[in-house]
Image (tube, rainbow, N blue to C red):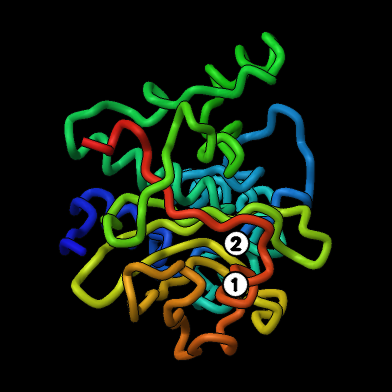
Amino acid sequence: MESSTLSQPALKMIAAYEHLPFEHTTVVCPYFINRRQRIRGALRALVGKGSPDDIVEEAVIIALKEKVDLKSLDAEGLKKFLVDHKLGIDCSGFVYYVLDAELRARNMGALKKHLRFPDRMSLLRKLIAKFRPVENTDVGVLVEDTNSAIVSLDRARAGDIITMRGIGQAQDRDHVLLVSAVDASAIHYAHAFQWSTDGKYLHGIKKGRIEILDPKKSLLEERWVEAGKIGEDSETYRHAKKTQMIELRRLNILEN
């Protein structure tokens, strides 16, 4: 595998979610599960699709309405405020903003210019998606062959995505991890997720790596390490093992 790293703007986007820029302190952006609420036509920040600035701005607005002094809250208090008000980012929203930053850094324009929404969507849904691309981009859209293609493990590079279709006990959820860097021995990734051990407030942006033992083998045969947990002790790996389909994919626009 050839070493590669995301552009500085893309890395800064990841860092912005890791350290949401409140005026007096920073806090890790919580993970947002779409099924928590369904608000038709809602602001991006309220449906797990907001940029770091969107999320901070909405938190400030809510605090003003509720007469809460955010400056009186430490990082832990801020995290609780965000979670209690359902402010956070879902996995595909996180990937969208980072890849958008990567494409712009490469002078390729915005990600929305290169995404194609499925033909199975109605004409109305496609029209809505055109004007609200972030809100309508989920894992299903990212894995469409018109948007991305499977790549072999030995060709992995920064900007690729690892997609999981059908995770959870009911196998009714999807998940996506973003490859932030690749070196001679590992694939490094970032994602927005919640482990069962996170409880109500400790979830959010996470980082991990997949140590490559044999590039000719599958992703699940390599060593997954996250939060000091290795292999079966990593909940991300356990989800990966139980998923219906796991793939390493690359946006078509990034193939060359």
Q: Is 186 above or below relative to 165? A: below
Q: For residue 241, what is the image quadrant?
A: bottom right
Decide which of 201, 164 is in the foreground and name it: 164
Secondary structure under the numbered disc 2 in the rendered image:
loop
- For badge 1, the amino acid type reads His
**Residue that label 2 marks:** 31
Residue in the image at 49% along x and 32% along y: 145
Q: Position of residue 132 (x, y in %)?
A: 56, 25
Dot 1: within a 10 Å radius of its alpha carbon, few (fewer than 14), some, or many (20 or more) residues? many
Residue 116 horizontal side relative to residue 153, left or right = right
Residue in the image at 42% along x and 59% along y: 17
Residue 69 horizontal side relative to residue 214, left or right = right
> Could you tell me how far apart the alpha carbons at marks 1 and 2 are, in whole angstroms?
6 Å
Residue in the image at 80% along x and 67% along y: 169
- For badge 2, the amino acid type reads Tyr
Q: How many marks?
A: 2
Secondary structure under the numbered disc 1 in the rendered image:
loop
Residue 241, which numbered label?
A: none
Q: Which quarter shows the C terminus?
A: top left
Residue in the image at 23% along x and 54% along y: 6
- Determine the residue located farthest toward the right in the rendered image: 170
Q: Position of residue 85 (x, y in %)?
A: 70, 57
Asked if the residue at tag 2 contacts the one at tag 1, i.e. Cβ–Cβ closer than 8 Å, the answer is yes
Q: Position of residue 248 (x, y in %)?
A: 43, 54
Q: Position of residue 133 (x, y in %)?
A: 52, 27
**Residue that label 1 marks:** 203
Q: Which quarter shows the N terminus?
A: bottom left
- Determine the residue located farthest toward the top in the rendered image: 123
Q: Going from the N terminus, do you reach mark 1 or mark 2 first?
A: 2
